[in-house]
Amino acid sequence: MAEFKVHRVRFFDYMPTAIRAMAFNPRTERLAVARADGALEIFNFADNYFQEKVIPGQDGRAAEALCWLGQRLFSAGLNGEITEYDLENLRPRYTVEAYGGPIWSISSNSQGSLLAVGCEDGTVKIFEILEERIQFQRNLDRQKGRIISLCWHPSGTLIAAGMMDMIKIFDAESGRATHRLLVERGVGASKSREVVVWSIAFLSDHTIISGDSAGKVQVWDGLTGTLVRTHLVTKWDVLALSSSQDESSVVAGTSEGTVVQFQFLSSNVGQQDKEWVRTRTFKNHSHDVRGLAHTDTAVVSGGMDTQLVVRPLLDKVEKNTQESALRKIAFPHRSLVCCAKKAGLLLFQFPDHLELWRLGESNGHGSPGDSLPVKRKPEKLIQLKRKGEDHISCSALSPCGGWLAYSTVSSFRLYRLQNNTISVTKVSRLPKDLRSAQQLCFSSDSTKLFASSCRSSVLVVDLNQSDCKYLHTLRPKSGSSQPIHLLCVSEDGKWLATANTDCLIHVFNLDKLKLHCTVPVYSSCPTAIAIHPTNSNLVVVHADQQIFEYSLVQKEYTEWSRKLQKQGLHPLWMERDTPITHIAFNPKNPAHIILHDTFMFCIIDQNLPLPEAKTPLYNQMTLRSLPESERIMHSHAFKICKNFQHLLCVRLLEDHSLVVVERPLLDILSQLPAPVRQKKFAT
């Protein structure tokens, strides 16, 4: 592996916020995750669990519950509003006031025609689903207590609602309550202590399963309104429930951080009678499990400790395969760090502000592996707070360090930086087309700004000393309406490559300001793209870990790429469960491709042979122990270093030194007593 001078940066204090709710769409295999800061994330489970979309949050818009309705996504929150999201432009489409106080739960019928919400004032409100909006239809019979949880019967005729100390079953057509199921407080519990029915599941055979604040999972007969069985699973709260598609399994999430599975099984072999039996307990969280999704092969959970955990059910998958591995998704699959490689500056993106840092300097030289003494410590130059309530969706810093830009879903800001005097000047006159952006990047000479807009288009803006001017809008011919999530410009300023969540990669000629080519479509979403500075080859890595190299001059895959696809990537490379998030190139050696994911830094040497399936992939420590004369015999193209906990960014500066931004996994809740329940009743 090539030797670099490395800046190890550990002062990016970014930490994801708690997961508040989850909803899984089995038809599209998409998981929606709502976080405490109001942000929503969409994961594609069919594409190696890639986080393909992020909708930034907004102050006061935290979702308490999520619901898919076909390919439409809705949320409800304690602000009393129902929100539908625009998944193409990554923003709220509209918001409807329910006029029932805080909303605790939201659920749709299986027919996709009606939406029900449970409100603080004791009403279950029904909304009709229209093509463009939702419309209030009616209230069900009002109850004395707040409606905490909701679930439709698959027939669409009944609704089960969890409340304080009871469960009500409503006839969805008449609005009348047909049954009242009283929930026990538990042995030794105070009579004055109310039991909160946090979660509920309504199965096809009219079985109702509930989870409550007394730590019980209870099974009810919804036809007669009688209690069938009680499972005491925790001393604290059962906060979430989720059932499998075939309704043979139900999982429950607790405030102790455990997930308990129940299965509908015969108590004795050969008997026909079945009952709900507790079968497994998973402990993958440190605090409250607030969201659950039960897929065909795994249990997905998330909560206060911010991690999304995919726990495979080993009776549903083949053992010792990629699908049988436990996954923990802790950090976003996109970069929140931007580097001004000519100025030695770093820009850190937070939801509510940006931080601009100057890298430290060292004096002297050392041998490989030495820690050099620091002559000048890193320095925070600027902390820039966003304007308005919308959180920052994207940001960029020009390579010269003289320009800074950021966008929310409703506004765009551009600033001129003076690093010598550490001053920031806002550019007040912006082109009218530049209202907001989904992705931003600057040209290598810092004279142009590229901002992705709606329908996979890109705005080109010309920059001068203190002003900017709109030049052109680059539009692909594909007509795709999906958002661009990757932007990349070549060093010579001739090419601009874009990638969107339709797996389409477009390359534009910036000299002619028109589309140059569209890379052949691959089934997996691109996670990182980069253009080689000397040969204009586009390198793409996809969510399924495949690597392609495409010649922009010849408009075809390179010989190296064809060889790689013919031989196939190493099995250990393909089994990695974190996506590549950045690609760069080594100016000292054009054959070196530099890339990284959350745990691994890799240099691919195109001059060396590709590793065979039986060759050790992680062999760098082995090579260092061998004499130099023998290393060539055992070396291969993939030079990998795994000595990282959470690698958020690797960038190459103009002096050929590496900036490595790491984030140790910190439990931000370690000082809190467990369990800690985040749900608070509105006063």
Image (cartoon, rainbow, N blue to C red):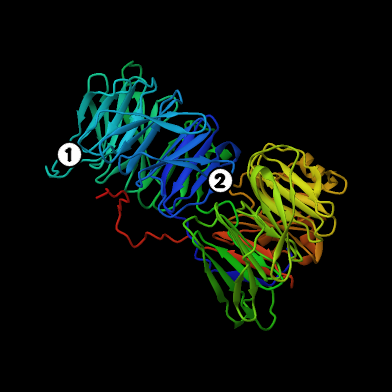
Callout 1 crowding tier (Cα within 10 Å): few <14, some 14–19, many ≥20? some
Residue 402, position as x, y percentages in the image = 68, 71
Residue 213, position as x, y percentages in the image = 25, 42
Foreground pick, 554 / 249: 554
**Do we see residue 314 in this rendering?**
no
Q: Is residue 549 left or right of residue 620?
A: right
Callout 2 crowding tier (Cα within 10 Å): few <14, some 14–19, many ≥20? many
Residue 86 image-quadrant placement: top right
Foreground pick, 250 / 42: 42
Q: Is residue 422 left or right of residue 164?
A: right
Q: Is residue 529 left or right of residue 550?
A: left
In the rendered image, the quadrant that contains the N terminus is: bottom right
State the residue position of label 2. 90
Residue 191, position as x, y percentages in the image = 11, 42
Residue at point 57%, 61% (across, down): 644
Residue at point 62%, 49% (across, down): 579
Residue furthest left in the image? 191
Residue 387, position as x, y percentages in the image = 50, 62
Residue 136 image-quadrant placement: top left
Give SS at disc 2: loop
Amino acid at circle 1: Gly
Q: Which mark is residue 186?
A: 1
Work out how far the residue at label 2 is from the one at label 1, CA to CA, in angstroms.
45 Å
Q: Is residue 680 above or below residue 228?
A: below
Amino acid at circle 2: Leu
Q: Is residue 519 left or right of residue 454?
A: right
Foreground pick, 177 / 239: 177
**Do we see residue 61 in this rendering?**
yes
Give SS at disc 1: loop
Q: Is residue 337 above or below residue 310?
A: below
Q: Closer to the N terminus: mark 2 or mark 1?
A: 2
